[in-house]
Amino acid sequence: MATKKTSIDFTIGLPPANLRGDTNTVLRNSMPLVRIYPGVPSFTKGISLFTRRDLFSSGGKNSKELSYTTLLSQHGFTLQQTSATSNGYLELAFLADSFPTDSFTNEYGENFLQSFTDVASEKSAAIMQMMGASSAGQAFDKLTKGLKTRGGAIGKTIGTALSAGRNAAADLVKALPGGGTLAGGINLVSSLAAGSRLDFPMLWKSSGFQPSYTMTIRLYNPNPSDADTTRKYIIGPIAALMLLGIPISHDGVTYSWPFIHKIYSPGIYNLDPAFISNITVIKGGDQQQISFKQKLGIVDVRIDFGSLFNSILAGRNSSNRPTLQNYIDGMSNEKSGVRNFSTYQATSAQAQEHAAAARIANTTTITTKRQAPTAIEKTDEEKQNPAERVASSVKAIADAIEAKMPSAFKI
């Protein structure tokens, strides 16, 4: 005999619905919602390599593929979130405790021309600095002068020859066409040879977009003492959330990659494709809410997720990677299904069950009312106003106490 599957027919993360439709509306309106579209990689032509293909329910290209709802059914649960299930996504409500902060970075580095200007070695630059020479010409003059004064006859001969060579090179530069411009280049090279530096503008190297988002889904158990309620509101949602980010096995021995997703929260973010990097299950929540039988009353599930791409592009729009257009479109949209109190209607199966229970309770309520007495039937006490009735009651109690007191104590 097949085991009856537990239905998840509510938005995971919302507190259980009650008999007051207006409070249910406030809860849903106040909490941010997110839609998760599970999928698998699908090879595509071009440099994108692969894209995300939806695999929420069965009926994919490969009949042996395990879809999200198939895996959930294998664990004893069915997903029936009305419009969410029919449109191929899982709807969650999360706490507004850690909203995302996006960071876009650009990396700039040294211009490749910078290395061409480092013509002087570290040692020669140090010698030029100790000599106080700002150019190779000044160092040359000081060197030849030192050879002439302290080098004896041979030093004077070498210094004279070096000076003559330098002068000849300078005259040659001036004699060439465009000598003025070339002379400026010679001076620049002379300064660089002496250890001077040029500051070229840096060039762009790469850009980065690495969103790391976190959302906390709080699961509520309205009746921890009941096994079916615990299974419906705690165990089932945990299974649904865990399936989003754990590896998948087809034979029970080997396993492969988990689902990749489109994670869309209207007005906040839209990541496609996205991956889940971490799932943390905090049993009992921050307040450790458990029953005497150690059934969980609250469970916090924290999910960390990010984008498969390391950059976001401006220009031509693409559905296979993050773009500026997709980014601003996600913030331009808004949460649907928001209702005010006067137009509230119960739509979830759970709310309908509560409404039916309320109608049954109303039909069995004793409605006998006490008829209001006529003016003739009113007692003296009823004719008094509230203040007079209180004063007379106090006086009666005081008289009763006084009557029981010994005569010696009476005033």
Image: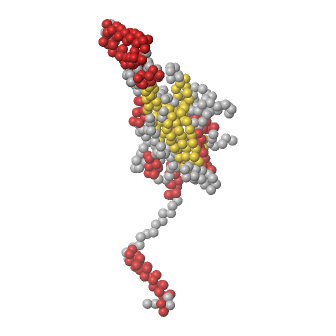
Image x and y of residue 400, in percent: 48, 84
Please say if 193 is above or below 348.
above
Image x and y of residue 355, in percent: 50, 51
Please say if 323 is above or below 345.
above
Name the quarter where the C terminus is drawn: bottom left
Query: Between residues 281 and 228, which one lies in front from this camera angle?
Result: 281
- At 46% from the left edge and 45% from the top edge, which residue is drawn? 96
Image x and y of residue 28, in percent: 46, 46
Please say if 295 is above or below 90.
below
- At 57% from the left edge and 46% from the top edge, which residue is drawn? 282
The furthest residue to the bottom: 408
Query: Between residues 7 and 13, which one lies in front from this camera angle?
Result: 13
Please say if 116 is above or below 23.
above
User: Can you see residue 78?
Assistant: no
Name the quarter where the N terminus is drawn: top right
In this rendering, would 11 be left or right of 145? right
Task: Name the quadrant containing residue 333.
Answer: top left
In this rendering, would 134 be left or right of 283? left
Query: Between residues 81 and 288, which one lies in front from this camera angle?
Result: 288
- At 62% from the left edge and 51% from the top edge, which residue is drawn? 295
Task: Name the quadrant containing residue 238.
Answer: top right
User: Can you see residue 358?
Assistant: yes
